[in-house]
Image (tube, helix red, strand yellow):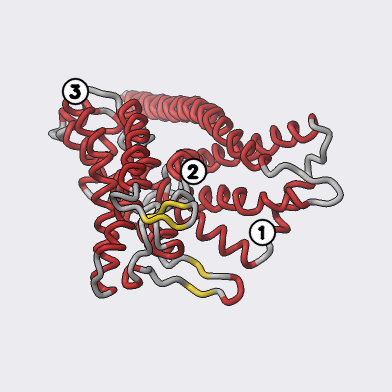
Amino acid sequence: MKKFDKERVLLAVAGPVIALIAAVALTSVVLLASGKSPIEPYSLMFEQAGFSDVQVLIINQAGMYYLAALAVAIGFRMNLFNIGVDGQYRLAAMVTAVVGAHVSLPSGLQIPLLILVAMLTGAFWAGIAGILKTTRGVSEVVATIMLNAIATSVIGYLTLTENFGVPVGNNQTTGVMHKSGWFPGISMGDSGEIYGFVVIAALGGVLYWLVLNRTRFGFDLRATGASQSAAAASGVNAKRMVLTAMIISGAVAGLAGMPILLGDVHTYSLSFPTGLGFTGITIALLGRNNPVGIAFAALLIAFLDKASPALDYAQPVAYDKEIAVIMQGLIVIAVVVSYEAVRRWGLRRQQQRVGEELAAAARAAGADNGNNGNNDTVKEVAAR
């Protein structure tokens, strides 16, 4: 069994903790500079989160964030920066909504079909960036940013009334999906309903961990992300791994919008949530690409989103709910700084430990030589 390494655990936890402390401290400075209490907003948000209906909203939002962050994390583990998760999940949600509105199958077939459509759409859109990178050397950052804009235009075109659009008042929708494609939720009584797809998100995290840490494919993916040349020398096709990682990342991204699409709104419209992909980057960084860390990070960001509206109604002094947005931005900055600081400290500590082990080995070798010399002396005296 592996020996429990306290320093390794400390290094893993130190980055996120330092980032959160720094973000809270800097946000408090902003509040002080505006002449407001640096503590009351936090107490108001925690008080708001104490209501069961808000807790349901937080869990539902965290489920979508979790899937988006997993998609980003898959790219990160391959040393790829998939910024296109936002376009991938929105396009996947729109195509899935169209299929769900025009195809009617029994629930046992309809739901798997819609999930497959979402994954294939996201994989296809991310695969374009993967092909451009492996065949033409185009940076995945540039390609995915451009594909986000193209996805927005494609969605706008396909949701026109003459295509698949169905006007509902001032909103442009794709029509209500057949009920056989509605994913059952978990009723919480008067507090609302938790999206059933949150369970799928949790299973996705387990599968992510198993594939990356317990399969040959996961090892090859991590090895290629660490060094493509070293991976190629050991027989791994680096280009194929890059393309595969992008496709898998896109497939997971395609699921990010499914909790709310299949569990609540049942249509794609102008009011469909946007920005999940960019928030997923923050969550993946804060969670250090670890499925458990990502889960806690997703809950934290969802808490900031759903509890911050209470700041607008605070009495006698109202606070701007954008304080939560400021904190999220500061978390991103603090994550980058704190992780780099922790990395450097870890390297220094590792060098120190190696030096201590070498010194101990040298002392042990010197003691052995001394004992051997004494034994030789005793033998000479006995011989005389």
Q: Position of residue 227 (x, y in %)?
A: 27, 28
Q: Position of residue 71 (x, y in %)?
A: 36, 45
Whole-Å distance between the Cαs marked 2 and 1?
Answer: 20 Å
Mark 1: secondary structure: helix
290 sits to left or right of 94? right
Badge 1, how many Cα within 10 Å: few under 14, some, many 20+? many
Q: Residue at x 36, y 42 (%)?
A: 156
Quarter location, residue 378: top left
Q: Residue at x 34, y 48 (%)?
A: 159
Q: Amino acid at mark 1?
A: Ala
Q: Nearer the viewer, mark 2 or mark 1?
A: 1
**Marked residue nearer the N-terminal end (3 or 2):** 3
On the image, numbered disc 3 is attached to which residue? 136
**Marked residue nearer the N-terminal end (3 or 1):** 1
Instruction: Tell me: residue 191, above or below residue 359.
Output: below
Residue 35 versus residue 182: which sits nearer the camera?
Answer: 182
Mark 2: secondary structure: helix
123 sits to left or right of 7? left
On the image, numbered disc 2 is attached to which residue? 283
Instruction: Tell me: residue 128, above or below residue 104.
Output: above
On the image, numbered disc 1 is attached to which residue? 49
Whether residue 99 is visible to the viewer of this picture, yes or no, is yes
Q: Amino acid at mark 2?
A: Ile
Whole-Å distance between the Cαs marked 3 and 2?
Answer: 31 Å
Quadrant where the C terminus lies?
top left
Q: Position of residue 350 (x, y in %)?
A: 46, 29
Badge 3, how many Cα within 10 Å: few under 14, some, many 20+? few
Whether residue 253 is visible to the viewer of this picture, yes or no, is no
Residue 373 versus residue 350: which sits nearer the camera?
Answer: 350
Q: Residue at x 69, y 32 (%)?
A: 26
